[in-house]
Amino acid sequence: MSRPVLWTYAFVDRPARHFERACDFWTAVTQTSLSEPRGEQGEFVTLLPKDADAGVKVQAVTEGDGGAHLDLAVEDVPGFVATALGLGAETAAAHDGWAVLRSPAGQLFCAVPWHGEYVRPPVVAGARLDQVCLDVPPSVYESEVAFWGGLLPDWSSRPGSRPEFHVVEPPRGLPIRILLQRLEAERAVHGHLDLACGADIDAVRAHHEGLGAQLVARHPHWTVMRDPTGGLYCLTGRDAHTGGLPRPVTRPSEPTADR
């Protein structure tokens, strides 16, 4: 088996026609600057924080409405790819030094080289973008949970505080964790971003609305938002510094949520 994942990136995938607007919004949300564009069509950029290593990138996609995916940075890309394929993944695209893979449920993710990243981006404006949530249809949910737990054996893979959630949490210091959410109905797997806000969800929501986002729905422990390009994401009540769950504020028996 290859060495463990040494860094993680969340990718904001947005339609190419909205790429510039997506970059403007997400750099404002994360208080970062843009790298120079990369790729054959200039379709990739990195959001660069001050005095830390990057943990978020943006991609212009030419098909579909976008979403989110993970980049997993490792020292041994071929070994990691072989492990993923042995667990049921498929190769979506092979490149020189990195690969695009597809999980058993169909979620795209990338295996990329590690370049020495180790300083986690800070909490900014009361929030931290720290989670990619995979919305998984019920027919393949259990196999998807098993896949990510097997691919990331040094991560903590455990049931969430609600029956439809499963958490795959990295070792301390890595910037992005995974939440698997079992959907109620069958549809294609889809990834979206989650930001941990602690008790500041309403303040963060108002800040994001000032940047052009729209409120979609409120839940007891998270709020669903739509960014200016139409992409959905969530503001969660998890602690922005630790990623941990909030303490119950009503009845002790009431469940909190890993969102």
Image (cartoon, rainbow, N blue to C red):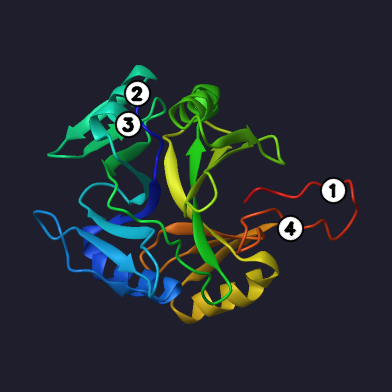
**Label 3 belongs to which residue?**
102
What residue is at 58 percent from the left and 36 percent from the top?
156
Q: Measured from the top left, where is residue 217 in percent x and y?
A: 61, 60
Residue contact at pointers 2 and 4, CB within 8 angstroms = no
Residue contact at pointers 3 and 1, CB within 8 angstroms = no
Q: Between tags 1 and 4, which lies in front?
A: 4
**Label 2 belongs to which residue?**
83
Q: Is residue 153 left or right of residue 92?
A: right
**Label 4 belongs to which residue?**
246
Q: Secondary structure at mark 1?
A: loop
- Residue 79 is drawn in which quadrant? top left
**Label 1 belongs to which residue?**
254
Q: CA distance from mark 3 to mark 2?
A: 13 Å
First along the sequence among labels 1 and 4: 4
First along the sequence among labels 4 and 3: 3
Give above or below for 184 relative to 37.
Answer: above
- Residue 88 is drawn in which quadrant? top left
